[in-house]
Amino acid sequence: MYTACVEIFTGNGIVLSHNALRARLHRRHLQTSKIVLSRFAIVSDQEKEQIILDKDSINTKKSTKLAVDVFQAYVLERWEHLNANFLEWPVKTLNEVLAKFWMEARTQSGESYKLT
C-alpha cells in the first residue's frame, strides 16, 4: 500500500505532517476517519488575529511608524491648535492637513523626500 507524505502549512509558520494534522483534528473532537483534506484551512479566531498581525513585513511596520511619527511632529509644530490625535479629526480637516504635510515635509537635513 502506498502512503503519501502530506504537509499542511497552517498560516502561522507551522508545517504539520498528515499525522500531526490528524492529531490536531482529533483534539478538536472531530472524527478523523471521516475527514477529507481540503485546500481550505480551518482557521481559529486566534490564528486569524495572528495572520492579520503578521500581514505586513517588519520593514513596512517600521516605515509606517516613522511616517506617523513625522506626521505627528508636523501637526504639533504647524497645527498646534488641533487635537494631536488625528484619528479623531473630521475627514475634511485630515485631508487638508495631509495635503499640506505632503507638500511641506522634509528630511531632518532639510531635503525633500524622494518619490517612491
Image (spheres, rainbow, N blue to C red):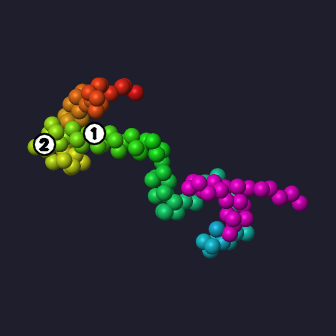
Residue drawn at (21%, 38%) of the image? 74
Magenta stretch containing residue 31, yes or no?
no
- Looking at the image, residue 21 lies above or below residue 70: below
Instruction: Name the amino acid, label 2.
Output: Glu
Image spot of residue 58 (x, y percent):
46, 45
Which of the marked residues, 2 or 1, is nearer the chain's N terminus? 1
On the image, which quarter does residue 34 sit in?
bottom right
Image spot of residue 16 (x, y percent):
67, 59
Image spot of residue 66 (x, y percent):
34, 41
Residue drawn at (73%, 65%) of the image? 19
Q: What is the magenta range?
A: 1-23
- Within-10-Å neighbours for mark 2: few <14, some 14–19, many 20+: few
Image spot of residue 57 (x, y percent):
48, 44
Quadrant (top left/top right/bottom left/bottom right) for the C terminus: top left
Q: Which residue does the numbered mark 2 point to in the structure image?
A: 80
Marker disc for residue 70: 1
The CA span between labels 2 and 1 is: 14 Å
Q: Is residue 80 visible?
A: yes
- Toward the viewer: 111 or 92? 111
Q: Is residue 54 left or right of residue 1?
A: left
Residue drawn at (21%, 49%) of the image? 85
Q: Is residue 102 visible?
A: no
